[in-house]
Image (cartoon, helix red, strand yellow):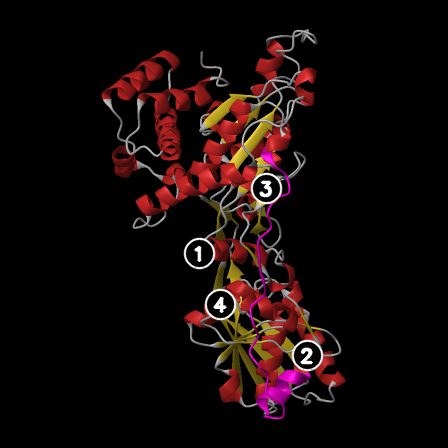
């Protein structure tokens, strides 16, 4: 007899269906797993055998073969324990095979039969819903999986509870979704003394999801400004929250099954490897750029990151996704993030400070910022200088609007963009628009067009740079409540791009 259960194998955020077939046939006693399993899957036979023994379920002295189909798809992770156990119990006629064949299961088995939480319950629930199946997962993962309303989720704490459910002794109740958390940052923009221009740039970047480069001497407030960005960003929409949570589910970052409506803010250290930033490793896990999807990736000390790591950012910035190529698979993760980079003007950090004059100026600055390639620098929509704040200004009362006021303006501008791009798949903010639609939404009058032409000729803007200035001008116009881009909008957008671009 061949019994069947179903589970999933993860390829990026996609959960591909896997059929687990179990055959118990005459022959020398053995327990083998075939179908391209990794080490963790191969070890499932020992965990399953011991867990069943602890529940007084003896395996027959026969040949037990588990086949994971499709056989050419790599199977990784300990979540195959539960579907293997269910297929085996079905083959032994302990539980009804017809019911097992109507569900998707995943979970790791302890030696005593209890179920341990695994990563990826949310994508697995999405896959189960698409195939009109029930999902079985550990209790610790049930609240996470239950966010998929179209899928019924049963979450036992051990294998014996599941057996009692199938035999009708004790029916399991469907799991309920975890809490929706809204984590507002306690850091306020009013804490930043001075730096009004940088605050304005931060507001524009938040309103249009524009990439921003901050260049300034040590202690000028670059990191302080970036840390206050989450406080002015709008909450994730329902679709964005689901997209982001699926990635965080694979990385095991969902706390007690709760989904956060706050946008991710990731700040990796400059010693992080390429696999940590872009994604990869043994199981091609998502990297920081994917964990920052629909949120912010803050890279402090930007030139200190390895050159190879920085250059890998170029394509994800443009496409909004990253492909991790392996010999046996190509895995794609979404990574539509806002990049905020901070850098000193030179290695010593005091290139423009007359009181602490750099002895190697201007070569020191050219060498240091030269670590950032021209094509990568060209992908920043806005590049501004953050000058040091005078000591006498630190004693002044707070100036400018607080984060709540700025967040309201940002939310209004984002709402305008949502209405503008609502019918266009893949477009949510001004930073995403391109092609023919870019020309339509960035229509500007003759004065602003003449200014753009002069600036493009004078500063040698690339075609990419020209379009990025238009997108920033569109965002400034949205904040201003203007239907058409005007000359002041273009002038402000140009000032944010050229001040630190070394193009003058």
In this rendering, the answer to whether 362 lies above or below 236 is: above
Crowding near the residue tagged with mark 2, few <14, some 14–19, many ≥20 C-alpha atoms within 10 Å: many
Q: Nearer the viewer, residue 149 or 200?
A: 200
The residue tagged 1 is: 239
Q: Nearer the viewer, mark 4 or mark 3?
A: 4
Q: Nearer the viewer, residue 195 or 455?
A: 195
The residue tagged 2 is: 158
- Membership of 337 in magenta stretch: no
Which quarter of the rendering shows the C terminus? top left
Crowding near the residue tagged with mark 4, few <14, some 14–19, many ≥20 C-alpha atoms within 10 Å: many
Q: What residue range appears in magenta?
A: 160-189
**N-term mark: 4 or 3:** 4
Q: The residue tagged with tag 2: helix, strand or loop?
A: loop
| Residue at the (58%, 88%) spot, across then down | 166
**N-term mark: 2 or 4:** 4
Alpha carbons under labels 1 and 4: distance apart: 12 Å
Alpha carbons under labels 3 and 2: distance apart: 37 Å
The residue tagged 3 is: 277
Crowding near the residue tagged with mark 1, few <14, some 14–19, many ≥20 C-alpha atoms within 10 Å: few
The residue tagged 4 is: 148
In this rendering, the answer to whether 159 lies above or below 195 is: below
Q: Nearer the viewer, mark 2 or mark 4?
A: 4
- Write down the quadrant of residue 464 in the picture: top left
- Write down the quadrant of residue 490 in the picture: top left
The x and y percentages for residue 246 are 52, 58
Asked if marks 2 and 1 touch (Cβ < 8 Å), the reply is: no
Q: The residue tagged with tag 1: helix, strand or loop?
A: helix
**N-term mark: 3 or 1:** 1
Alpha carbons under labels 3 and 1: distance apart: 24 Å
Asked if marks 1 and 4 touch (Cβ < 8 Å), the reply is: no
């Amino acid at each position: 007899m061949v019994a069947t259960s179903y589970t999933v194998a993860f390829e990026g955020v996609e959960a591909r269906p896997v059929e687990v077939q179990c055959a118990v046939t005459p022959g020398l006693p053995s327990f083998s797993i075939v179908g391209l399993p990794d080490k963790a899957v191969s070890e499932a036979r020992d965990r399953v055998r011991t867990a069943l023994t602890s529940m007084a379920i003896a395996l027959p002295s026969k040949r037990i073969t588990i086949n994971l189909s499709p056989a050419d798809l790599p199977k990784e992770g300990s979540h195959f324990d539960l579907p293997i156990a269910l297929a085996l119990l079905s083959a032994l006629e302990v539980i009804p095979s017809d019911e097992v064949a109507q569900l998707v299961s995943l979970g790791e088995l302890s030696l005593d039969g209890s179920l341990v939480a695994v990563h990826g319950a949310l994508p697995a629930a999405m896959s189960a819903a698409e195939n009109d199946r029930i999902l079985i997962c550990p209790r610790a993962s049930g609240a996470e999986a239950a966010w998929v309303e179209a899928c019924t989720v049963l979450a036992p704490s051990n294998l014996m509870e599941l057996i009692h459910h199938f035999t009708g002794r004790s029916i399991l109740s469907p799991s309920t979704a975890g809490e929706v958390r809204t984590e507002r940052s306690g850091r306020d923009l009013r804490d930043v003394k001075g730096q009004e221009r940088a605050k304005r740039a931060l507001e524009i970047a938040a309103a249009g999801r524009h990439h921003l480069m901050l260049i300034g001497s040590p202690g000028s407030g670059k990191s302080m400004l970036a840390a206050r960005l989450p406080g002015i960003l709008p909450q994730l929409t329902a679709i964005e929250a689901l997209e982001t949570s699926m990635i965080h589910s694979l990385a095991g970052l969902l706390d007690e099954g709760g989904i956060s409506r706050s946008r991710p803010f990731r700040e990796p250290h400059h010693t992080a490897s390429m696999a940590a930033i872009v994604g990869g490793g043994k199981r091609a896990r998502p990297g920081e750029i994917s964990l920052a999807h629909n949120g912010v990736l803050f890279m402090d000390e930007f030139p200190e990151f390895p050159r190879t790591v920085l250059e890998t950012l170029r394509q994800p910035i443009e496409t909004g996704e990253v492909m991790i190529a392996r010999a046996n698979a190509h895995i794609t993760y979404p990574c539509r993030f806002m990049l905020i980079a901070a850098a000193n003007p030179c290695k010593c950090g005091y290139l423009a400070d007359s009181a602490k004059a750099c002895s190697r100026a201007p070569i020191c600055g050219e060498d240091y910022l030269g670590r950032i390639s021209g094509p990568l620098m060209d992908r920043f929509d806005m590049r501004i200088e953050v000058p040091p704040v005078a000591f006498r200004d630190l004693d002044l009362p707070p100036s400018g609007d607080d984060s709540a006021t700025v967040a309201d303006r940002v939310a209004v501008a984002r709402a305008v963009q949502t209405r503008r791009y609502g019918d266009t798949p893949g477009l949510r903010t001004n930073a995403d628009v391109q092609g023919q639609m870019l020309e339509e939404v960035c229509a500007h009058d003759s004065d602003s067009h003449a200014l753009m032409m002069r600036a493009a000729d004078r500063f040698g803007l690339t075609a990419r740079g020209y379009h990025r200035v238009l997108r920033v001008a569109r965002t400034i116009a949205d904040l201003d409540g203007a239907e058409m881009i005007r000359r002041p909008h273009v002038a402000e957008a140009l000032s944010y791009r050229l001040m630190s671009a070394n193009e003058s």
